[in-house]
Amino acid sequence: MSIPNDEDNNSVSRRAVIGGAMAAAVPAMGLARTVAAASGSRMVKSMTVYAPGGMDNLRVSQVEVRPPSAGEITVRLRASSINYHDYLMVRSRAKPQPLIPLSDGAGEVVEVGAGVANFKRGDNVISMFYPTWEDDRDIPEGFKTVPGDGIDGFAREMVTMPANAFTLAPKNLSHREAATLSCAGVTAWRALMTDGGLKSGDTVLTLGTGGVSVFAVQFAKMMGAKVISTTSSDEKAVRLKALGASEVINYRATPDWGQAVRDLTNGVGVDHIIETGGKDTWPQSIIAARNYGHIAYIGVVAGGHAEVPGGPILVKRLRIIGVAVANRQDQIAMVKTIEQKGNLKPVLDKDFALEQLGDAFRYEESGAHFGKITISI
């Protein structure tokens, strides 16, 4: 009997669910284990979301892990982290097929298929958001290859995937720290380094305290830039300054924060803006930008339909670049720099067990976190 491909979300023989309304599926586990044992595969624990989505439709399940074929590796996952994109995928599951969520995964290689030269057993690795996006010569369209969206993600104990679904992790970070890099971390890296060409002495404006914004503060400070941040919380303002922000503006107390940013830069404005606020922050971001400034519009985080004032963009000659995570070369460059600099530690908030994934998403929904919410596996 052939073993279903790991991307086949509908295969009854590879997935069985425990508890809730799906309890009737439990007898299928015996068949699944029999098939797995006969093929050299194994069954491992995972979390699966079912239509119509929502935290109450996340359930503990069993998923089949097959041995690696040529060009593939098997990874024992140790940690993941929560991104807003993951929250959207779980909150509303429009497709009828069940889905294993989470796009971030960190762990160690336990098996290597034939022809894989860039990984060996024991290597610590992190996942790629876009596994097939090698460099800027070929930008992927849509999310059909994205773990936790178009294919099953990393809310599971083990996975076999093509080797290009991973890169090496920084040697100086734990699994939990490394698990925060492959969406939020590398998005901030691409915005500032690849697209922005950040250099020492530049000024950077970050908005809020989500994962991308916090990483942007850290990367900017690491590279010798000056950082100005906004938040609505005095407590979070203290933490932003501790991370390296020179100035922090409370945007509730100062609704015209764009002008406040200009005042802090002697009327010039900032070189780079990490725009994660969307329609509610665009007008102020454009005021805050200097002539020839760079605004990184961060994909799903910003969301909404923004009314963008075209006149000031033209007059200031602004560069506005959309950022939807990053490619393999971006991720490799980020990992190398984190190892070389040795002074960046991802900011971690609460940690949850795999079975507590629903609680982790509820905490994300509350907005109380600072930095990354992680999942230990």
Image (tube, helix red, strand yellow):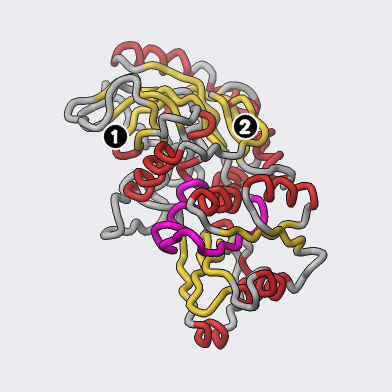
Q: Residues within 10 Å of mark 1 (few under 14, many from 20)?
A: many
Which is closer to the viewer, label 1 or label 2?
A: 1
Q: Amino acid at mark 2?
A: Leu
Which residue carries the number 2 mark? 357
Residue shown at 42% from the left, 57% from the top: 193
Give residue 345's position: percent from left, percent from top: 55, 37
Does the magenta segment cover residue 194?
yes
Give residue 327's position: percent from left, percent from top: 36, 51
Q: Relative to 220, is 67 on the left or the right? A: left
The image shows residue 57, relative to residue 131, as above or below, that is above
- Asked if residue 94 shows in the view, the reply is no
Q: Quarter of the image holding residue 19?
A: top right
Instruction: Point out the image quarter for the N terminus.
Output: top left
Residue shown at 21% from the left, 30% from the top: 116
Does the magenta segment cover residue 16?
no
Residue shown at 52% from the left, 83% from the top: 316
Q: Quarter of the image holding residue 125?
A: top left
Region of the chain picked out in magenta, as a range: 183-209
- Asked if residue 312 shows in the view, the reply is yes
Which residue carries the number 1 mark? 163
Q: Relative to 351, is 181 on the left or the right? A: left
Count all numbered tags in the image, as a single digit. 2
Residue shown at 79% from the left, 68% from the top: 254
Q: Earlier in the sequence, mark 1 or mark 2?
A: 1
